[in-house]
Amino acid sequence: MSDRYCIRGCKIRDEHFATCARSGEAYKGDDPCSGCARVYARDGVLICERCYRTLRRHLEDAADVVGHLRSIADPTKATVFDRIRVQSSSIEIPAPVAADLIDASNDITTTLNMWANHVAGEDRPGAGLAAGAMADAAHDVVRMAADVILDELDDLANDSHQIEALCEGVMVVHHGAPDVWTVADAAVRWPLEDAPRWAQVPCPECDLMAVRIQPGRNGRPSRYRCTTADCEWEANSKDDGGLWASVFAEPAPVEVRPHDPRWMTLADAARLVERTTGTVRGWVTQKLLTPQMGRYWKDDVLAVATHKRGEAA
């Protein structure tokens, strides 16, 4: 375990120092302490495990978020009249698009391109999206920048100045309309439509059946998060050498073999050889037929019927 604390000041909920004056049954004030014991940093970096994985998650989702924003708004039709309805009888005037959709996608792209340039050693500002960029093009631009940052994330997270600035630009959620949109701001405002599922095994931290699995998108790893209020466990399918991918693998469906029409019911077997069901039952009693789970093999039924016809002749 690291001997450093999370540089972002994260605290352990409901754990307090002995000198904490704002906790305990005797505290009667209006501003109770939710926890003042600090969280240890993840090994090799200056932020805690929760911050690291949240930051990584937002970087992995950034391209999908920007593509999502561009898919619900034509950037060439943006207007400064945000959220104002405009009525017109002319079919040539397009409906106004909320300008914050364009601002958010452009801010995220600019921020990530700036960081990608910095990581690559290029001394130039980050570029926003080209006017009229479509969803797929915007997705590719942001994904390239995010991949560059993710490749160097551990080094960035071990530099106090860089990691604080990166977290501020990616994972901080602002209240109201932000001056500069982060990935987290956009993800909260316009959440991606996902199809998570419940894991069939318990959380390795709290041992409760409360882990939600978010399938990976566009080649990204799947993610696993415990939904228990007091548990903050989270991982992805590449962590710990792919351990969690095997632990939370979806159970293989039970093999269902298709019905073979040559296995016949008693009524079908009697109809096939133009006999009564009682006659076919008699063949079973005589050990001429051997049913399997109430079904009769077509070839066996025909063979017995042919044999009986030979005896009658």
Image (cartoon, rainbow, N blue to C red):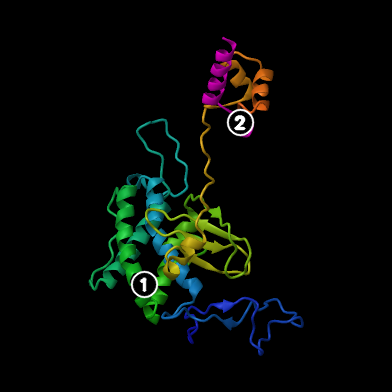
The correct choice, above or below, for 83 with respect to 165 in the image is above
For label 1, the crowd category at 10 Å Cα-Cα, with few meaning under 14, some 14 to 19 and many 20 or more, is many
Check disc 2 and give the amino acid type: Thr
Q: Quadrant of residue 141?
A: bottom left
- Of residue 243 and residue 296, the one placed in the foreground of this image is 296
The residue range painted magenta reads: 290-313
* Residue at figure coordinates x 64%, y 31% from the top left: 294
| Marks 1 and 2, how far apart at CA | 68 Å
Kindly identify which residue carries mark 1: 153
x and y percentages locating residue 117 in the rendered image: 26, 68
Q: Quadrant of the C terminus?
A: top right
Q: Foreground residue, 297 or 105? A: 297
Q: Residue at x 53, y 32 (%)?
A: 259
Instruction: Examine the image and state in which quarter residue 219 appears.
Output: bottom left
Q: Residue visible at 46% across and 69% down?
A: 53
| Disc 2 target residue | 290
